[in-house]
């Protein structure tokens, strides 16, 4: 997001995004959408209650009491996955209580992006959101209408008119965006949403390095294996790199699986160098 997160918050965001990976692994598009709606609900509660945010980020409070507070506030309103994620969030360290709102909102957007990815519509959603953001940037009247405080029903109706042929994921995201600016301009809110969509897309793209061009059948087997591992459709970017020598190097999200001969030779060289010392 555009919000600058401190060191503790950045590290915690990495942890909770990994938790989201697990929550959307192998689920249906509808389940991911439901998770998104619950995380948006939690975002609204946190945004409107500074005392709750401070309680959940207070470093002097033990994790058990924070988790109990999450259970008390959200236990009857959220499903198991969303509740588990909020409990994880409460147990982590945060640089500022204000960081909770943009972080949970990002998780909500990414959950809907996962729903779109499961339906093989993530690229479409990104394109539609970008196109709408450009239309708003080019129209003073649209910006004025959507930046107006209140009038949520009118703003949703206007957004739906503009999105008459858009995907359901795009419609849901834009409907929430225009009614939850929270001090942002409409342009700023679109920037945040597009950032979160791109962040989720990066989680389902594998960067593969091989020495030689692989066949279509090999590519399909690789995509199938990675999709099975992730539990969601995965796209593969192939890079031909002669230094690979043999095997394959796969960089996926924050993980690197390097099975190349050059990697193994480098490891052997380090071992030998250590034996000589």
Image (tube, rainbow, N blue to C red):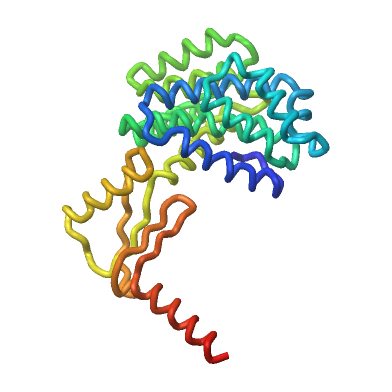
Judge left or right: residue 6 versus residue 138.
right
Looking at the rendering, in which quadrant would you find the C terminus? bottom right
Judge left or right: residue 31 versus residue 180.
left
Q: Position of residue 204 (x, y in %)?
A: 39, 44
- Residue 234, above or below 30: below
- Residue 108, above or below 256: above
Judge left or right: residue 72 versus residue 175.
right
In this view, the residue in front, 2 or 43, is 43
**Residue 2 placement: quadrant:** top right
The residue sitting at 69% across, 29% down in the picture is: 67
- Residue 99, above or below 145: below
In this view, the residue in front, 47 or 65, is 65
Q: Position of residue 65 (x, y in %)?
A: 75, 29
- Residue 72, above or below 258: above
On the question of residue 73 being in view, the answer is yes
The residue sitting at 46% across, 40% down in the picture is: 200
* Outermost residue, right side: 60
The residue sitting at 38% across, 29% down in the picture is: 27
**Residue 245 placement: quadrant:** bottom left
In this view, the residue in front, 157 or 112, is 112
On the question of residue 142 being in view, the answer is no
Q: Position of residue 109 (x, y in %)?
A: 50, 30
Q: Position of residue 74 (x, y in %)?
A: 63, 19
The residue sitting at 63% across, 20% down in the picture is: 44
Looking at the rendering, in which quadrant would you find the N terminus? top right
In this view, the residue in front, 121 or 209, is 209
């Amino acid at each position: 997001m555009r919000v600058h997160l401190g060191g503790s918050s950045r590290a915690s965001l990495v942890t909770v995004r990994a938790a989201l990976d697990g929550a959307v692994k192998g689920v249906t598009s509808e389940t991911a959408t439901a998770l998104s709606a619950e995380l948006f609900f939690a975002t609204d509660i946190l945004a409107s209650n500074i005392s709750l945010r401070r309680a959940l980020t207070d470093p002097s409070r033990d994790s058990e009491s924070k988790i109990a507070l999450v259970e008390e506030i959200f236990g009857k309103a959220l499903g198991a996955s969303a509740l588990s994620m909020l409990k994880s969030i409460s147990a982590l360290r945060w640089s500022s209580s204000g960081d909770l709102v943009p972080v949970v909102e990002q998780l909500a957007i990414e959950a809907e992006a996962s729903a779109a990815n499961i339906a093989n519509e993530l690229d479409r959603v990104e394109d539609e959101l970008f196109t709408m953001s450009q239309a708003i940037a080019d129209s003073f009247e649209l910006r004025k209408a959507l930046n107006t405080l209140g009038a949520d029903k009118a703003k949703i109706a206007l957004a739906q008119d503009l999105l008459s042929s858009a995907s359901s994921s795009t419609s849901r995201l834009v409907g929430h965006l225009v009614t939850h600016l929270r001090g942002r301009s409409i342009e700023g809110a679109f920037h945040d949403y597009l950032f979160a969509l791109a962040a989720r897309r990066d989680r389902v793209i594998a960067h593969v390095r091989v020495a030689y061009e692989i066949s279509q059948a090999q590519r399909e087997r690789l995509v199938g294996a990675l999709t099975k591992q992730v539990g969601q459709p995965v796209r593969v970017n192939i890079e031909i790199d002669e230094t690979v020598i043999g095997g394959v190097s796969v960089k996926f999200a924050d993980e690197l699986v390097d099975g190349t001969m050059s990697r193994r030779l480098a490891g052997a060289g380090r071992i030998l160098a250590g034996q000589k010392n």
